[in-house]
Image (spheres, grey):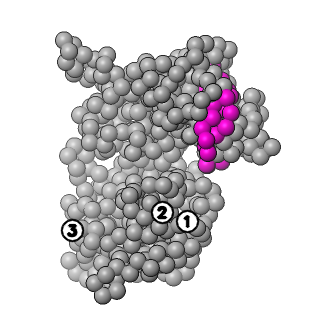
Amino acid sequence: MQKNNSPYIVEMKNITKTFPGTKALDKVSLRLRKGEIHALVGENGAGKSTLMNVLTGQFFCDSGDLYVEGEPVRFSSPKEAMKKSIILVPQELNLVMEASVAENIFLGNEKVSGIWIDWKKVQKEAKKLLELLSVEIDVTRPVKELSAAYQQLVSIARALAYRPKVLILDEPTAVLTNKEATSLFVCMQELKKKETAMVFISHHLDEVMEQCDRITIMKDGCLVKEVSVEEITKDQMINLMAGKKVEKSQRIQREVSDEIFMKVHNLSRKGEFDKISFHVNKGEILCVSGLVGAGRTEIFKCIFGITEKEPGGKIYIEGQEAEIKSPIEAIAYGMGYVSEERRHDGIVPDLSVMENLVLPSLGNMKKAGLLDWKKAADVTDRYVQSFQIKTASRETRIKNLSGGNQQKVIVARWMAKGIKMLILDEPTRGIDVNAKGEIHQLIRDLADNGVAVIVISSEMEEVLALADRIMVVHKGMISGYLEDVDIATQEDVLKVAFQ
């Protein structure tokens, strides 16, 4: 390879990468300038993360050239990329949960005095880095005690500790509140002034349009277009990502049964929520709205038996009091639960699509005391086809599927179990706009089949498109309901939250 006199700090040319059964990247090129925020967008499975893994040395490409500051390079490990000040903040957190905030921020990059780590300096510098993100937390606290949002910010602070010339942010705002995201954007603009180059991967296209300078659009492992933000609209970007015109998920009026499936009375859990009472009908989509941290997730973790309720609270299932002390008991009552942390709590990454899909139904798939693999395969094939799950085969490891297809497998898991109520927490977080519409349709199909569906969501467009009724939670209490969703607006939901 000859030296390249490129004006770009990073230039990837004709990068190709093949995995067994699929071509993940097909002659993809990416050009990154100093001091720019460059968006990398595309549907789940488009190849965005794979391209960044090639750039950071996680993967070795089959063919193609990589230049950093005009010099040809081949990284065989992330450590080599880090030596060139190329740092990735991955979508999946890689923190050491038992270690402190400060220890995580400087892990592998410790401040030493002689042969010893200077812990006072580590803690002081960790505080400074978090201040750049407008975060005030005790840096001696174990990371496991932090919310997902703060863990994400710690992960970003760790990247900043390396003083990167190239910073790659993969879905950095997926778990952040609006306030936290705004603080991150302020930090990004400051880094931009210091000529740090940034790759910003996000499904939040409003953020892309507001924060980025140029956009590279990918689809099915191929480069579709490179364009400046001023030269494209959000709708045009969506259509290029999908390869077709994508219609927004529209609200559909539905007839809902007045037969109650679950009723909750005076449910409390100290420090999380207090005296919660509500009901959900058969075939109803009840959307639970409110600010992040309002207690929405905590309420439904308790109902599903993941956490323990305080004495006095009652749960009734189809008119009968139910004592639910574990998820196994909740499942026995006909409940299913889709966690907001899909990768940590939803899937078993190294198991196949089939093994993940039939997991709760194993007890119903035995023949002569052994697992009936033919039945498991038949059930999996039926849902792969009806849910249009994109996978090379039922034996493919679920971790190799896109986020949207992983989510479809998790929903199919509960359909195969024959549940009567499904709780979905942030069901389309980190999922592209096309897959989001498909998940919305699956939710409506569930409800149309008589399943009571509870959707916890921070996306107001999603809530207004899906809900038959909206329950608003604020500071651990139900602050009100919106019954006439057809004429409801985002402002109406906020008014209820703060009334």
Q: Is residue 182 above or below residue 353?
A: below
The three-letter code of the residue at mark 2 reads: Arg
Residue pointed to by mark 3: 76
The answer for how far apart the CA atoms under marks 1 and 2 are is 8 Å
Residue matched to label 1: 137
Circle 1/circle 3 CB separation < 8 Å = no
Residue extent of the magenta highlight: 266-293
Q: In the displayed structure, would residue 463 be above or below residue 100?
A: above
Q: In the image, is residue 137 part of the stretch drawn in magenta?
A: no
The tag earlier along the polypeptide, 1 or 3, is 3
Dot 2 falls on a residue whose secondary structure is loop
Report if the CB atoms under discs 1 and 2 are less than 8 Å apart. Answer: yes
- Report, in whole angstroms, how far the alpha carbon at label 2 lies from the one at label 3: 35 Å
Q: Position of residue 266 (x, y in %)?
A: 67, 29
Please name the residue shown 36% across and 25% down the image.
360
**323 or 252, which lies in front?**
323
- Residue beneath disc 2: 141
Q: Is residue 253 visible?
A: yes
